[in-house]
């Protein structure tokens, strides 16, 4: 069994925009090119934030996987990993209500000309928000298709100046034991830190997401701002980010420290390289019964394989 019975969570966090019920028509409309025009309307009435704020008008993105059926909102908000809130797939939905997402700021430091701290509402004021439907693949074998709301990480790069020494970039999640009860327990070496090589971070697919399904990001999915890197396993996409640090040397990430032979730095979705304890050749979409074949780079090979030209992806897993 992949999906457990959904736990009881506050209604305000699980009310999906009605439009996603009419999903197929919506996808068809996008496919025939009504894209940006219909998208604003499609999101007309979700949460109060969405009505007026930056979520009112979302740009549709050419980077969307438009031929895919979306994973139900309820599955994406009740089944997932966010170890700061507990080790089970339903822990995030049960416990993430403790997270306070305002005030919130993100500090950008390390190998940059000037370290800067951005308030989340400032970020929302300069970021032109897009909706991007991305495939997501978790190392444990489940996958999903999610309409994220956010902007390319490269937009943030325009506002800070990395030095010539910046070769990698780290993403640090909040680690506050008052809000995140499991940070008191050494499940991982907190804070949760993930990292990308600079060219991976600059790739247009690499996204900072502030919402999904037309709504402000649910807490259990990494509010108020998280990373989404669709060609890599889910754990590369750090949630609830408070610090972005540019560094010269390839960093150790939280999962590399936890299991160096199971979780490599690159973590590109690769059906040919088994995880030490299981095959990665197939996946099951949340809500589906049958498994499907996993695609190299999660189906994004055309866009990203070039980043790894000449690298042995069995060694650099
Ligand atoms: N801070 C933090 N970020 C995290 C995790 C976590 O435990 N803590 N889990 C990761 C893993 S393993 C996955 S699969 C995704 C799951 O969240 P999503 O379904 O919202 O993408 O979040 C990733 N980001
Ligand atoms: Mo994962």
Image (spheres, rainbow, N blue to C red):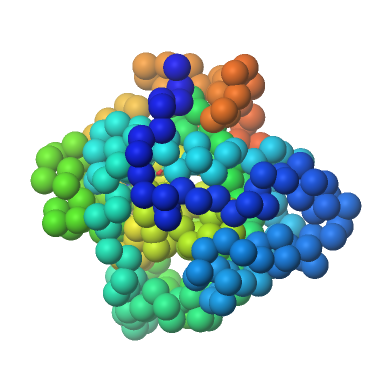
Which quarter of the image is occupied by the N terminus? Answer: top left
Quarter assignment of residue 316: top left
Residue drawn at x 76%, y 50% is: 26
Q: In the image, is residue 22 above or below residue 241?
A: above
Q: Which quarter of the rendered image does ligand 1 occupy?
A: top left
Where's residue 122, x and y in %? 43, 81
Residue 102 in view in this figure: yes
Q: Foreground: 298 or 136?
A: 136
- In the picture, measured across the screen, residue 83 lies left or right of residue 272, that is left
Which quarter of the image is occupied by the C terminus? Answer: top left
Where's residue 226, x and y in %? 42, 57
Q: Foreground: 168 or 99?
A: 99
Q: In the image, is residue 189 above or below residue 61?
A: above
Q: In the image, is residue 294 above or below residue 122?
A: above
Residue 222 in view in this figure: no
Residue drawn at x 80%, y 67% is: 37
Where's residue 298, x and y in %? 60, 36
Quarter assignment of residue 107: bottom left
């Amino acid at each position: 069994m992949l999906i457990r019975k959904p736990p009881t969570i506050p209604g305000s966090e699980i009310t999906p925009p009605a439009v996603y019920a009419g999903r197929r028509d919506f996808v068809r409309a996008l496919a025939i090119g009504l894209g940006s025009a219909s998208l604003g309307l499609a999101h007309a009435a979700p949460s109060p934030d969405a009505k007026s704020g930056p979520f009112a008008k979302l740009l549709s993105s050419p980077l969307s996987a438009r031929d895919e059926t979306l994973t139900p909102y309820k599955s994406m908000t009740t089944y997932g990993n966010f170890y700061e809130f507990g080790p089970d797939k339903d822990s995030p939905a049960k416990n993430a209500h403790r997270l306070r997402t305002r005030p919130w700021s993100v500090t950008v430091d390390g190998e940059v000309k000037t370290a800067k701290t951005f308030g989340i509402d400032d970020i929302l004021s300069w970021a032109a928000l897009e909706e991007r439907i991305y495939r997501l693949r978790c190392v444990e074998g489940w996958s999903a298709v999610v309409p994220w709301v956010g902007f390319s990480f490269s937009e943030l790069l325009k506002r800070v100046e990395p030095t010539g020494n910046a070769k990698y970039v780290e993403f640090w999640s909040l680690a506050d034991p008052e809000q995140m009860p499991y940070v008191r327990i050494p499940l991982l070496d907190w804070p949760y830190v993930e990292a990308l090589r600079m060219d991976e971070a600059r790739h247009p697919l690499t996204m900072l997401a502030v919402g999904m399904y037309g709504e402000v990001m649910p807490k259990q999915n990494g509010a108020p701002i998280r990373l989404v890197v669709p060609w890599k396993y889910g754990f590369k996409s750090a949630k609830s980010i408070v610090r972005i640090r540019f560094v010269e040397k390839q960093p150790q990430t939280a999962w590399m420290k936890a299991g160096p032979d199971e979780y490599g730095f690159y973590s590109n979705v690769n059906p040919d390289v088994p995880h030490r304890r299981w095959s990665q050749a197939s996946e099951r979409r949340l809500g589906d019964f049958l498994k499907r074949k996993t695609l190299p780079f999660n189906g994004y090979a055309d866009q990203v394989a070039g980043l790894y030209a000449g690298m042995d992806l069995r060694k650099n897993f």
